[in-house]
Image (cartoon, rainbow, N blue to C red):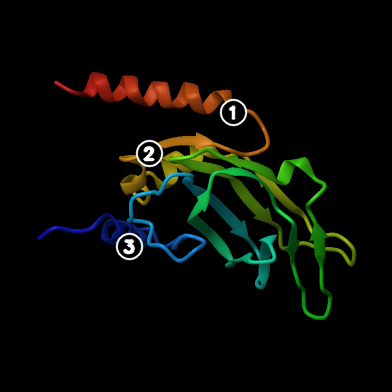
Amino acid sequence: MKISPLGKAVFMYLAMPLVDVAVAQSLDGTDLETELKPGEAYLLFDSDVNRDGVSLKLDDKHVYFLKRGKTLHAYRIKAGRYQWESINVPDYELPFYLSLNKNSQWSFTIEERKVNYIGRVLVDSQRGINKVPVKIKNRSAMMLDDYRDVVSFLLERYVFVYGGADKDDFLRFYQNTLKQENQLAQP
């Protein structure tokens, strides 16, 4: 019996109860397993959210709802430079909307025909009337370890890169170390 790559991802999701995997479709509804078209790439980010109702807005057409807990998000997207527009973190009757469009930490680059990890979105449960702790952090090496089995069907076909706002020299070093370990493990 042959198991599709998406089936493997679903199986790994069931084996990892502490992590929700939102292996989703592309922004235009195309399945992740379909070969990338020219100009397309994969957007990958994870979130660790300690409250309900959080949404992250890319533009008027694309709003991502972030579930409470740890979640991996994978989407097909056109290559290019992007900027998150806003994040909404409601709390009972206290709405909280944070504009991100002038904060360079919330920008990212998507390289064509690659798996582009852009960071971990962190939303803390503690909040004040006018403040909610919201951050995006580069956790590319940790993500590669934590979710390697879940996204292996993508990593087998495409190069994994960090596309977040900061430069990531450690990821390249880490990937080279993994390659060397794999070569030593082969007979």
Residue 91, image x and y in percent?
A: 77, 74
Query: Residue at coordinates 39% horizontally, 49% vertically from top-left?
Result: 36
Sequence-first tag of 2 and 1:
2
- The residue at which mark 2 appears reads as 158
Q: Earlier in the sequence, mark 3 or mark 1?
A: 3
Disc number lying in front (2 or 1) = 2
Amino acid at pointer 3: Val
SS for callout 2: loop
Amino acid at the residue labelled 1: Asp
Q: Quadrant of the N terminus?
A: bottom left
Q: CA distance from mark 2 to mark 1?
A: 18 Å
Residue 75, labelled with which disc? none
| Residue 93 falls left or right of residue 47 | right
Marks 2 and 1 close (CB-CB < 8 Å): no
**Image-quadrant location for residue 17:** bottom left
User: For the view shown, which residue lies furthest in the bottom direction?
Assistant: 93
Q: Tell me where residue 15 appears, x and y as whole percent.
A: 33, 59
Q: Of marks 2 and 3, which one's residue comes earlier in the chain?
A: 3
Q: Nearer the viewer, mark 2 or mark 3?
A: 2
Residue annotated with mark 1: 168
- Residue under label 3: 10
Q: CA distance from mark 3 to mark 1?
A: 30 Å
**Number of other residues with Cα within 10 Å of mark 2, as a class: few under 14, some 14 to 19, many 20 or more:** some
Q: Which residue is at the far left?
A: 1
Q: Residue at the spot x=90%, y=63% of the render?
A: 130
Looking at this rendering, what residue extends furthest in the front direction? Answer: 38
Q: How many marks?
A: 3
Report whether 88 appears left or right of 117: right
